Image (cartoon, helix red, strand yellow):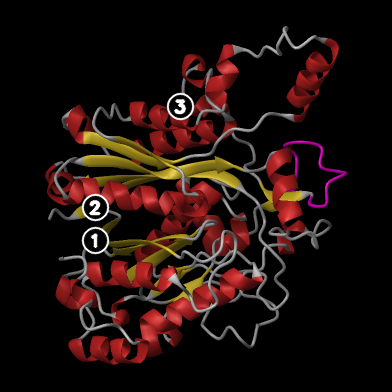
Amino acid sequence: MRRVAITGVGAVTPLGNNAKDTWRGLAEGRSGVSRLETFDASAFPVRIAGQVKGFDPASAGSARQRRHLSRAALFALAAAREALADSGGGWQDLDPYERGAAVAGTVGRPGLQELVDMSHQLSVSDFHDLYRQAPGDVLLRNQNVGVTAVARAGDCQGPVISVSTACAGAAHAIGEAYRRIQDGECALMLAGGFDALTTWMDVLGFSLLGAVTDRWNDDPERASRPFDAERSGFVLGEGAVIAVLEDWDSAVARGARVHAELVGYGSTLNAYRITDSPPDGGGAISAMRDALTESGLGPGGVDYIAAHGTGTPGNDASETAAIKEVFGRHAHELCTSSPKSMTGHLTSAAAGVNLIAALGAIREGLVPPTINLDHPDPKLDLDYVPNTAVRRPVRAAMVNAFAFGGTNACFVVRSADAEASDADASDADASDAEASAGVPADASERRAA
């Protein structure tokens, strides 16, 4: 199978309107959570979110291109344009039918005023005169419009995959793009996710569900607290991250800078509950193990995990249990941190932010922190990099993404200049960790089969 390079990254997030600023915010441990400004939330139980600030829609494209794109889709288009520019020149020479896109997207919501207008129209009519909306509004709420806009940015005329797996969406999209290149179907794929769950409906819905914290409305920067003993729910966010994945030989031939190599991917379902994570780690264990096995790295070959780390009591405990099961004793030696402590939860785009954290850690030897980790939970005893980034060499990193509905997706990236012999753990280390974790004897053969 073909090797897969990551040659470009673009982002619009609560920490910055490009990938560079987003990484710098992560490295500095800066919070992008603030009071909600997308609607009047003064009467809502939750009045904070990780919001994009200072975004210029014109950066996404022409007025004609922007006409039928939602706020979240505009983020995605701007991120895609940045990612393609970051990948350097020459990608345009690839056959358009060998260029594709796999993108996770949001489904649009009607605004409060629109619902009021609709209700009024129905109340004064005899129901023969239906509420009429502008035809373009339908497109604004269509997930596929944003996905195809991203594809068109790269003139991608090959496979276009629209993913809808919520919080695991971007990881699934990146993984599916990886498979298309591995199998020779495409030479280049745009992959990632976009979302903007900062609408009245999302904030109200997640508040009623009890999934988001309502304790920090007056101190929003301290609200997102993954792995902390005082965590009380996640913080909603918005943004987009798009990466350029490319056939390794093609990227090298055109002289592209390779950020990292994508070397493993796993995807599973918990089959447990819709909203809760299994206390024992559940399907996350299999997803992480499959990604690790395919990567060819022993457990000791991973130095950093960009955790899903939402800040809900159950998720953080479940993810910690899964990491311990997969990595054995090495779980306490590697670094694990949650970018959501700084951005909030970008749902369909969340794994894209984790990818930026992983790439930055590999490139700069700097692991971003989990901020607001002020009261360690005695039941969660890994190195979560509390509050301040740490310097250490990172040869390879794992990205975790676990979603409502029980879907799990994980992938592994490693340094572009790392040889397999340097990155792989020794057989002894792998055997020791597998014995500690209870890996079945045939686990290493699953992907090959």
Check the image and report above or below for 147 versus 7.
Answer: above
Q: Residue at x 72, y 37 (%)?
A: 38
User: Is the residue marked by circle 2 packed among few (<14), some (14-19), or many (20+) residues within 10 Å?
Assistant: many
Q: CA distance from mark 3 to mark 1?
A: 34 Å
Q: Residue at x 74, y 23 (%)?
A: 114
Instruction: Tell us which disc is closer to us: 3 or 1.
Output: 3
Amino acid type of disc 2?
A: Ala
Pinpoint residue 398: horizontal percent, then vertical percent: 38, 67
Find disc 1 in the rendering and name its residue.
416
Q: Are marks 2 and 1 in contact (CB under 8 Å)?
A: yes
Amino acid type of disc 3?
A: Val
Q: Main secondary structure of the magenta part?
A: loop
Q: Are marks 2 and 3 in contact (CB under 8 Å)?
A: no
Left or right of 297 in this view: 234: right
Would you say residue 11 is visible in this rendering?
no
Q: Nearer the viewer, residue 389 or 136?
A: 136
Find disc 2 in the rendering and name its residue.
5
Indicate which disc, 2 or 1, sits on the residue closer to the N terminus.
2
User: Is the residue marked by circle 3 packed among few (<14), some (14-19), or many (20+) residues within 10 Å?
Assistant: some
Instruction: Tell us which disc is closer to us: 2 or 3.
Output: 3
What span is colored magenta in the figure?
Answer: 34-46
Find disc 3 in the rendering and name its residue.
145
What element does badge 3 sit on? helix
Q: Nearer the viewer, residue 350 or 112?
A: 112
Amino acid type of disc 1?
A: Ala
Q: Residue at x 59, y 19 (%)?
A: 137
Indicate which disc, 3 or 1, sits on the residue closer to the N terminus.
3
Q: CA distance from mark 2 to mark 3?
A: 27 Å
Instruction: Tell us which disc is closer to us: 2 or 1.
Output: 2
Indicate which disc, 2 or 3, sits on the residue closer to the N terminus.
2
Q: CA distance from mark 2 to mark 1?
A: 8 Å
Check the image and report above or below for 135 versus 369.
Answer: above
